[in-house]
Image (cartoon, rainbow, N blue to C red):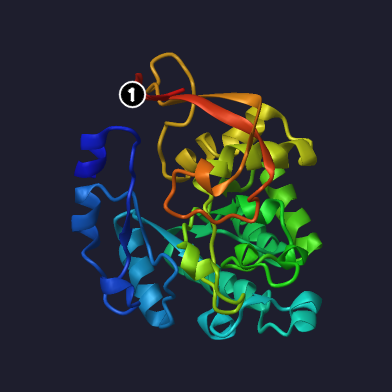
Amino acid sequence: MHRAKEIGKARVLPLGALTLGLNGERLAELAGLKKAGCVAFSQANKPVVDTEALLRAMEYAATFDFAIWLQAQDYWLARNGIAHEGEVASRLGLAGIPVAAETIAIATIVQLVRDTGCRVHLTRLSSAAGVTLVKQAIDEGLPLSFDIGVHHLLLTENDIGFFNPHARFSPPLRTQADRQALSNAAAAGIAAICSDHTPVGADDKLLPFGEAKPGATGLEVLLPLTLKWAEAAGVGLSDALARITSAPARTLGLASGQLGIGAVADICIFDSEATWQLTPEALKSRGKNSPWLGYMMSGKVKTTMVGGRVVFGE
């Protein structure tokens, strides 16, 4: 946080480790991390295999009204999987990750939320069944929220093609029906959209599909991909932008991500009609991988302001 403040080009709101070393056993010093500036606590991509440990963590977090972010994926069902368990994976000979890996994890988390009252945010849901379960829990009044990776709003298992490593994600790309359900959830405003920014080195993507690291550079294409999704889904510009600004801020309990008199002037100015080609050279990130490489993107950031100060401008 000190380095981010010193550079001053973005607001960095870190998630603290939920358990020591992310090993899923002993709780980290949550109170100290909160005091240091962490806005919530997470296991990142590491599972809490011990359900009792997760229960104790949620009980502790609920006591102090700390929020927990979790990826809903059962470790045992997903540990050997590579792609969505379905026709495409079978045809390509890839080990599958069933939708049950997500729904079983969600069912467990929902019950623990029901028992503890802990605020939980589920990251990067990937299935229609998962959305249904979370929506039912939200309708029940449980303190749950969730987001969807922008790539999952536009791509499906078919985009793996002939073992394209750029299309390997965690959780995996699923069916067209799943993609449509995710899109509907985002369009209805019950889900935020995240970049799922996971930069992977070039060497790690040059490997065979099953050995390539999952993930893609997402931050620099979040705007054009969100605009692309909105156009396809019939979502208005202001609503689409809310999914990547005020909705995530609301999840964190922040009043940012919006324009208004007296509001903090964290502003992004962009040209929605400007086009540019996504090439490795066009990416500032160390990760130069994306399933959209070579495509023309519509939507280009022209200026960004942090606290009313211009930090980027063409």
Q: Where is residue 105 in the image (x, y as percent from the top left)?
A: 56, 74
The N terminus lies in quadrant: top left
Visible in this render: residue 244? Answer: yes
The residue tagged 1 is 307
Q: Where is residue 193 in the image (x, y as percent from the top left)?
A: 58, 46
* Left or right: 22, with 188 as reference point: left
Residue located 49% across and 63% down the image: 202
Q: Where is residue 313 in the image (x, y as percent from the top left)?
A: 43, 23
Residue located 65% across and 51% down the image: 292
**194, 26: nearer the viewer:** 194
Instruction: Classify 128 as above or below 96.
Output: above
Visible in this render: residue 139? Answer: no
**251, 242: nearer the viewer:** 242
Residue located 69% across and 72% down the image: 163
At mark 1, the secondary structure is loop
* Left or right: 251, with 279 as reference point: left
**214, 102: nearer the viewer:** 214
**Crowding near pointer 1: few (<14 within 10 Å), some, many (20+)?**
some
Toward the top, the furthest residue is 261
Q: How many marks?
A: 1
